[in-house]
Every structure is written in structure tokens, then in C-alpha cells.
Amino acid sequence: MSWTRSRSRIRRLSVGTAIAAVAAGVIAGALVAGRSAWTDEASSLEVALAEAPTVKLAEVPSADGLPARGVFAQVTSDGLFCLFDAPLASPTMGGGGCNPAADPLGGRAMSASLSYDGGPSLDSVSDARIVGVATTQAASVRVLLSDGSWRAVKTKKARVGSHEFQAFGYRMRKSDLKRGLSPTAIVAFDVDGAEIDRQTTGIG
């Protein structure tokens, strides 16, 4: 995903750094310092998110017996724009991620993230969701699947502060997952049907 900071991504990077450090024979004290830096950053983000107002931008529609979820945004006091999906009744950030509030799209026409329950193999995924925001120049957003077929994504105009977006939430069909299909890209198009941005993704 294109987000520059997220709790899940920070965790993956810290583990990779620790493994590399062990391979290089770095002393244990350096590893402890690395873990401490990650803990401090994660704690700081948690505090900032707890204090930031939550704005609902769109919904991940209900389907296949699964309830609708909200697509939520928060702008933190330390200058981050964070986007995530969560149950409508409890909008607390779990997956998703953050970009600088001054540049919520990270210099692109679209920012999106994929999250799923279960996995990593497709046959054990129970729910897969894609959420994101795109520039107002995006007339449509579609998901490209691994067999080359497309799925349309409903977008909704949204505003956070001075920024306007096309926000969206998409839930993978269980029938597609059972057929072994996974998302390979999220693509935004302008009013003429020209591609304006593409973000690769995938399950597993």
C-alpha cells in the first residue's frame, strides 16, 4: 500500500530490521534499541489517533452475510491523515495506514489498502476488503482480478478539511475467492476512461 506509516507496516519493518541485524551479528543492545524506537513510534501514533476526530467517508457494502463496514479518516495533531475500515459501530483503526495530512494521497492520484481476515492462502480468506481515496479527477475506480476480469467499485464524494476526494470501499465476493481469484490492482480512471493511477495489490 502507498501509506507512509501504519501500525501493521511499522511492525513488519521492525521485524525485518531485527532479522537483518542478527544476520550481521549486531549486538543485542542494538536490537533492544530498535524495538524501543518502534514501540515509541507506535505508542505516539496510538495516542494521536485516540485524540483525533473520526470522519466517515464511505462504506464497504454488506455482502455474503457479512455486515457493512465504514471507511473512516482521521487527521492527527502530529500531521497525519489516516484511513482505515472498521465496524460501523466501533470506528477504531486496525488496518489501513497514514500519509502526511498535507499530502493525503502521497503524491499520487489514489491511495488504497487491502485487508483480509484469514489467509494467507485464498481458500482460508473469509473477508477481503479494499478501501481508499482518489483525487476528484477520478470518475471511476475498478479492481482488476487475477483472471483479467474487472469489478466496479462505487465511489462517494468526501471532504476532510480542505481536501476533497472520491472515497471508496470494496468487498471481494466470496464466489470470486472460491474460484481462486484475487485482486491484483486497484485502478482509477478519468471521465474519458483513461487510466490515471494504478496500485498493485494481492492476497498471500
Image (spheres, helix red, strand yellow):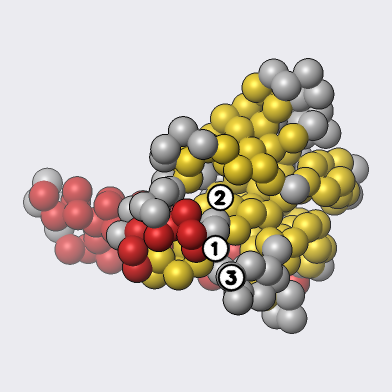
Identity of the residue drawn at 62% across and 27% down: 197
Q: Is residue 11 above or below residue 104?
A: below
Contact, mark 1 vs mark 3 (Cβ under 8 Å): no
Image coordinates for residue 57, horizontal then vertical, percent: 80, 57
Image coordinates for residue 169, horizontal then vertical, percent: 68, 54
Query: On the picture, is 188 further left or further right than 120?
Result: right
Q: Amino acid at mark 1?
A: Gly
Report the residue marked by disc 1: 95
Q: Which mark is residue 64?
A: 3
Q: Between disc 1 and disc 2, whose residue precedes?
A: 1
Q: CA distance from mark 1 to mark 3?
A: 22 Å
Q: SS of the residue at dot 1?
A: loop
Q: SS of the residue at dot 2?
A: strand
Q: Which mark is residue 113?
A: 2
Query: On the picture, is 112 further left or further right than 174?
Result: right
Image coordinates for residue 102, horizontal then vertical, percent: 75, 39
Identity of the residue drawn at 64% across and 54% down: 170
Image coordinates for residue 121, horizontal then vertical, percent: 30, 60
| Total labels drawn | 3
Mark 3 Cα-neighbour bin, 10 Å: few <14, some 14–19, many ≥20: few
* Depth order, front residue of 82/100: 82
